[in-house]
Amino acid sequence: MTKVLQNVQMLNEQGELQTVNIAMVDGKITEIGQNVNVAGAEIIEGKGLVVAPGFVDVHTHLREPGFEHKETIATGSASAAKGGFTTICAMPNTKPVPDSVENMQLINGLIKESAVIRVLPYGSLTKDISGEVRTSIEELKAHGAVAFSDDGVGIQLASTMYEQMKDAAQHDVVVVAHCEDNSLIYDGVMHEGKRNQELGLPGIPSICESVQIARDVLLAEAAGARYHVCHVSTKESVRAVRDAKAAGIRVTAEVCPHHLLLEEMDIPSDDANWKMNPPLRAADDKDSLHAALLDGTIDCIATDHAPHTVEEKCCGMVGAPFGIVGFETAFPLLYTQFVETGKWTLKQLIDWMSVKAAQIFDLPYGTLEVGSSADMILIDLNKEQTIDAEGFVSKGRNTPFNGWVAKGWPVLTIFEGNIVYQEAE
Ligand SMILES: [Zn+2]
């Protein structure tokens, strides 16, 4: 049966909005244009709404298996669908870790059972993400690993990273790194700068991240590997990635919404809803992340959606786990703060959240064209709403953005031709 998304505003190559109809059959886009025949089709009316490709998030934590009290694949994927995402990559810091064929199959089964959108699992780089015994990239790739990462921790030993990069190069998969040198964490819970001293909390210096990126880009060069840096947060990290790209090293990078929106001085108090890893850095770090997105040093935006329970986040930064949720607030916050203010175009933001992310992993998603998977969202750019963590579909309530007012809310999400989220009337 043909379905037609009718009277929607779609961006053209020049970044202008044009009214079109989009037809889909069997989960694929079959026609886009002003004169699409709608006779006999099921109509989805989209007048006054912008259509975009379903967003692609290459850095998410769904917590299942093992930590279902924080999130499940069902709640996490539904939260993503509400935020406009139709393809998400799930980090492997679950229990068990997808570090063997057996565990990979277990996770694939769970995804098949309960995901409402496309969930692509990472394989881990080392057994149990302990940084010691290397996994089989060949086997895990054959069983569906989209890419490889030990996200949550840095790989401490250069030789372990180097050997896995060589294997990854051989199998043409991307090594995705959370960069953190354990000898430079100093038990920190926020950025080592001005605000941590005011609050009397231990700080994580910028070099904790940047020195490992500098190491890894040289390892990637030697191994001939494709290397992707998670959640870049410091200006020195930006410089290392920029220099590596200029040298022809195959490096890509992502930035998280919170690192673009917030800085250390915004942290109001010893409140763990402001604790994430890497931490909110200084104002000049934030400025360098913006410049890096605009000049292409940073390739895409990823949420690092990291749900935790209220109890885990209740009692100050020192005892709390790192991480904040991100799916349901990412687009409206970025749209309001940077597109409405004229710093970015709408096309830039949508591209950073869709096709640019997909390209890093050769994923055939994040585009709106005939033949594409019918993964689309409708956005109401004029809808203004106050962020209320209590209303999240995610189990997580851990966000520093509670109470912020934002415009530009996804109101309908289509995955493979079917509506998987629709705003309540
Ligand atoms: Zn990480």
Image (spheres, rainbow, N blue to C red):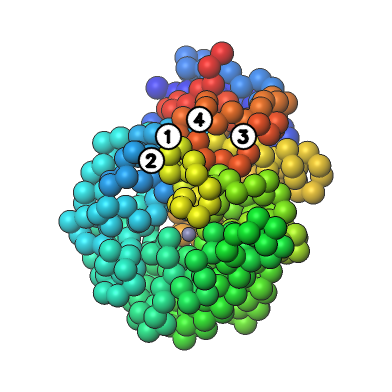
Q: Residues within 10 Å of mark 1 (few under 14, many from 20)?
A: many
Q: Distance between the residues labelled 2 and 3?
A: 18 Å
Residue 18: image location, x then y, percent? 72, 32
**Gap in Å between the C-alphas at discs 3 and 4?**
11 Å
> Which of disc 4 and disc 3 is earlier in sequence?
4
The answer to whether residue 310 shows anywhere in this view is yes
Q: Residue 402 — which label?
A: 3
Say left or right for 73 vs 60.
Answer: left
Residue that label 1 marks = 395
Q: Which of marks 3 and 1 is nearer the N terminus?
A: 1
Disc 2: which residue: 70
Q: Do the residues labelled 4 and 2 touch (CB within 8 Å)?
A: no
Compare marks 4 and 2 and give the one earlier in the sequence. 2
Amino acid marked by disc 2: Lys
Disc 3 to disc 1, C-alpha distance: 15 Å
Q: Residue at x 50, y 66 (%)?
A: 187
Mark with earlier residue (1, 2): 2
Whether residue 54 is visible, yes or no, is: no
Q: Is residue 85 left or right of residue 332?
A: left
Whether the residue carrying mark 3 lies under 8 Å from ligand 1 is answered with no
The circle on residue 392 is: 4
Label 4 sits on what residue type? Answer: Phe
Q: Do the residues labelled 3 and 1 touch (CB within 8 Å)?
A: no
Q: Which amino acid does label 1 sit on?
A: Lys
Which element type, helix, strand or loop, lies under badge 1? loop
- Cα separation between marks 4 and 1: 7 Å
Tell me the CA gap for discs 1 and 2. Answer: 6 Å
Residue shown at 67%/25% (left/top)? Answer: 385
For disc 2, does the CB lie below 8 Å from ligand 1?
no
